[in-house]
Image: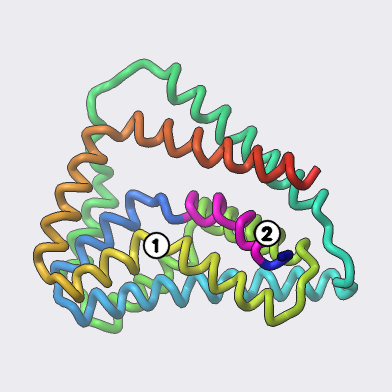
Amino acid sequence: MPVLSAAFHLIPYALLAALSPIGFAATITVMRTGRLKALGFAVGVVVGQLLMCSILVSVGVAARPDRTKAHPTVEGVLELGLAVVLLSYAFVVRRRPETSRRPSSGRSKAALERLQHVHLATASGVGLLLGIGGPKRLVLTALASASITAAGLARSNDAALIGWYGLLATLLVWLPVLGYLLLGNRAVTTLDAAMEWLNRHRRPAIIYALVIVGLALLVNAASLL
């Protein structure tokens, strides 16, 4: 089915957007402030991501009013280009000399500390901004939106794909918060251990993530070109 195929092609973009160490650390931090603030933060992130993707898809639809035909070549070129970038970066990281673990950025650390003392509305607002994203998330959302537009599907299908991408791209926010709502502090302990493991294995984790997503994009591109 065209919708399922389009949803499949969105997965690599969403996974790259979801793999945000800062977003994951912020989620764990806000979970320590209580369930209500954690829920507000997660809702803000999801809403921000859905809002930005919806805006970009709407812009794409307005720029291309004739949507009777799909443009798989456009999707394929986008995915091929991103695959080359990711695999090249994985090669660079692999060849880079091993160094001692990088200390946390002072600015990031200070921001995370402030997040422990915010009100519910502020936590939700921070989540909204995080969902809208910085340069990396915005670029990936733009690519995903272009893929949705190029699929040439009905508006209702566009909405379903936006929802699918939004949930996947914020997976490492809403899923930990859901676990926290159900399990309480046990979820925080588990996530702390996961964060510590990621800090110790940062380099191989980055390489494997880049290679896996890059290869997935290559397979997707080959099916479209």
In this view, the residue in front, 68 or 49, is 68
In the image, residue 57 sits, relative to residue 81, either above or below, namely: below
User: Picture quarter containing residue 41?
Assistant: bottom left
Label 2 residue SS: helix
Left or right of residue 47, residue 113 in this image: left
Nearer the observer: mark 1 or 2; the answer is: 2
Q: Is residue 171 magenta?
A: no
Residue depicted at x 47% and y 73%:
48
Tell me which secondary structure the magenta stretch mostly adopts: helix
Q: Position of residue 136 (x, y in %)?
A: 52, 51
In the image, residue 131 sits, relative to residue 191, either above or below, namely: below
Disc number at residue 171? 1
Disc number at residue 183? none
Q: How many marks?
A: 2
Q: Quadrant of the C terminus?
A: top right
Residue depicted at x 63% and y 78%:
159
Q: Which amino acid does label 2 sit on?
A: Ser
The residue wearing badge 2 is 5
Q: Where is residue 165 in the image (x, y as percent from the top left)?
A: 54, 65
Magenta extent = 4-17
In the image, residue 84 sits, relative to residue 140, either above or below, namely: above
Disc 1 packing (10 Å; few <14; some 14–19; many ≥20): many
Between the residue at mark 1 and the residue at mark 2, the CA separation in whole angstroms equals: 20 Å
Residue depicted at x 73% and y 72%:
59
Q: What residue type is labelled 1?
A: Leu
Residue positioned most to the front? 1
In this view, the residue in front, 114 or 21, is 21
User: Picture quarter containing residue 215?
Assistant: top right
Q: Position of residue 103 (x, y in %)?
A: 22, 36
In this view, the residue in front, 149 or 32, is 149
